[in-house]
Image (tube, rainbow, N blue to C red):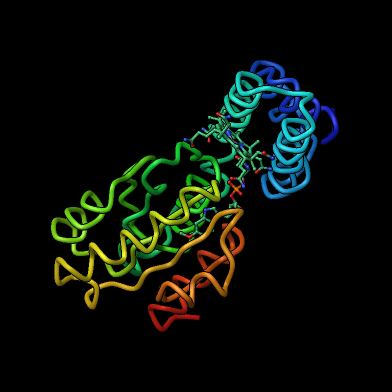
Amino acid sequence: MDLDTIYDAVLDGDAGATTAAVEAALAAGETAQAILNEACIPAMDEVGALFEEGEKFVPEMLISARAMAAAMVILRPLLIEAGVENVGRVVLGTVHGDLHDIGKNLVGMMLEGAGFEVIDLGTDVPPQKFVDAVVEYQPHIVGMSALLTTTTKSMPATLNALTEAGVRDQVKVIIGGAPITDDFAVKIGADGFAADAGSAARAARALMGLS
Ligand code: B1M
């Protein structure tokens, strides 16, 4: 059982085959990171490319996402690794209007692996819900994810809401997602941008003054 089998199972949206292939690959000595970065994420990229070409449709994107989620059930504990110290608290969410959560969930896992407590607000999170969470949980960092060009505007809207509520100065804000760039982060006044989940965890630690 190799990484190609996992890639094909995620691409086909076959959750059962994905689970079996991931378990077999781990038993054969593949690492969780390799399974994620060399099979699952490339398969999701291909789903997106086929969607753009009109070869796949929304229901097929959804079943591929479910297959990826099945893989993540197995990979999650391996990626997080137990026993890390608590270095800070992050409130994390996919912004208003956006239902994509695979990347956000990966960012959450990597943050947990880097020692953060993560309060996950889920998807389609309105600006006020971020504000309420900052007031309630007093996090060090707020993380926002957006996958749609149209929902990137929810990021400055959320920053404005944090400012208007008088809590912007209490937190650092990191943003990410496929349409997000460093320039955009600077333009809207976020404190950090990360292109992938590993960089998000490194950026969060750097914002806490940690290496
Ligand atoms: Co949608 N979708 N989708 N989709 N979908 C994209 C994003 C799209 C690029 C596909 C395409 O056209 N090629 C396109 C967006 C185009 C655009 O706006 N530029 C698109 C579209 C158009 C849509 C709909 C509008 C389709 C429709 O209904 N006509 C619709 C919108 C629904 C909504 O949100 N309101 C829609 C719906 C869906 C599904 C629900 C079917 C499903 C999501 C299921 C789910 O998430 N539970 C879905 C999927 C699966 C995708 C693709 C195929 C895969 C996304 C994914 O999970 N990638 C996607 C195409 C693609 O991305 N190639 C696509 C894997 C994931 C690991 O990567 O999320 O980028 P990613 O996360 C990365 C980094 O971006 C970064 O780290 C992660 C890990 O390395 N990162 C952060 C993410 N968040 C971060 C936060 C950080 C830091 C880094 O700090 C806090």
Image coordinates of residue 103 in percent, x first then y, are 55, 47
Which sits in the foreground, 177 or 109? 177
75 w.r.t. 130: above or below:
above
Horizontally, residue 53 falls left or right of residue 77, namely: right
**Dividing the picture into quarters, in which one does residue 11 lie?**
top right
- Indicate the position of residue 55 as horizontal and vertical percent values: 79, 24
Q: Front-most of 118 and 84?
A: 118
- Frontmost residue, 113 versus 14: 14
In the image, residue 187 above or below residue 114 = below
Q: Is residue 39 above or below residue 190?
A: above
Which quadrant of the render holds ligand 1? top right
Snapshot quadrant of residue 181: bottom right
Judged left or right of residue 22, residue 71 is left
Task: Give x and y (percent) for residue 177.
Answer: 55, 54
Residue at 48% from the left image edge and 45% from the top image edge:
105
- Which of 165/208 is in front? 165
- Count all numbered tags in the image, as a single digit: 0
Does residue 89 lie above or below 71 as drawn?
below
* Residue located at (41% from left, 47% from top): 94
Q: Within the image, what quadrant is residue 88 found in?
A: bottom left
Q: Which residue occupies 64% across, 26% down?
A: 61
Which x, y percent locates residue 32? 67, 45
Quadrant for the N terminus in the image: top right
